[in-house]
Amino acid sequence: HAPYSRFAVGAAIRTVGGALHVGANVENASYPEGWCAETSAIAAMVSAAEPGPGRRIAAVCVVADTIDGRLTTPCGGCRQRLAEFGMPDTEVTVSDPEGRARTYRLADLLPESFSMEKTA
C-alpha cells in the first residue's frame, strides 16, 4: 500500500523453524506512522509464533524496484528490527521485480547492532 511514494516493497521471512511470513510496506498520510515491508513481515511472524525457533529469522528476502540501478536494501530501522530476531549469519536477499538479486549477511548490513547483551 504505497499511495504516497508509489514505491512498493515486499518482504518474506523464513524462520529457523521453516515457517514463512510475508509483509508489504503500508504507507500512511502521517508519514512516520507507515510500516516498512520488513516490519510488516516481522509483525506477522510475532503474531503467529510462540517465542523460540518460530521467532528466529533464518533468512529474509526484500523485493523492490531499483533506485538509480541499485538494488534496494532494508533501511536502518529495519536492519535493527531484523537483528532483534535474526542472527549475524541471517541471509538478507534483496531483489528487483526482474529477479536480479544479491545476498548479504545481516552482520554485514548492520555490523554493530543494538542487542539485549549490549543494552542490559
Image: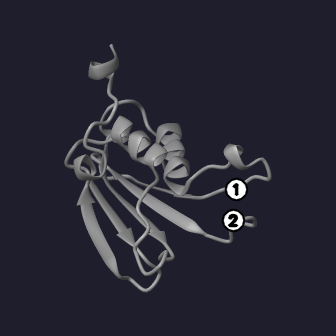
| Mark 2 Cα shell of 10 Å, populated few (<14), some (14-19), many (≥20) | some
Height in image: 43 above or below 108? Answer: above
Q: Residue at x 37, y 67 (%)?
A: 94
Dots 1 and 2: beta carbons under 8 Å?
A: yes
Q: Earlier in the sequence, mark 1 or mark 2?
A: 2
In the image, what residue type sits under mark 2?
A: Ala
Question: Which residue is situated farthest in the right direction here?
Answer: 29
Seen in the image, is 108 located left or right of residue 2?
A: left
Quarter of the image containing the N terminus?
bottom right
Q: Position of residue 28 (x, y in %)?
A: 75, 52
Q: Secondary structure at mark 2?
A: loop
Where residue 2 is drawn, which disc sits there?
2
Q: Position of residue 86 (x, y in %)?
A: 31, 42
In the image, what residue type sits under mark 1?
A: Glu
Q: Residue 118: name its quadrant.
A: top left
Question: Which residue is situated farthest in the bottom direction here?
Answer: 98
Seen in the image, is 60 located left or right of residue 103?
A: right
Camera-side residue: 29 or 10?
29
Q: Position of residue 16 (x, y in %)?
A: 27, 46
Q: How many numbered marks have been drawn onto this rendered protein structure? A: 2
Q: Secondary structure at mark 1?
A: loop
Seen in the image, is 26 located left or right of residue 92?
A: right
Q: Position of residue 102 (x, y in %)?
A: 28, 71
Question: Which residue is situated farthest in the left direction here?
Answer: 89
Question: Which residue is situated farthest in the front direction here?
Answer: 68
Camera-side residue: 4 or 63?
4
Camera-side residue: 69 or 88?
69
Here the colouring is one colour
Where residue 27 is drawn, which disc sits there?
1
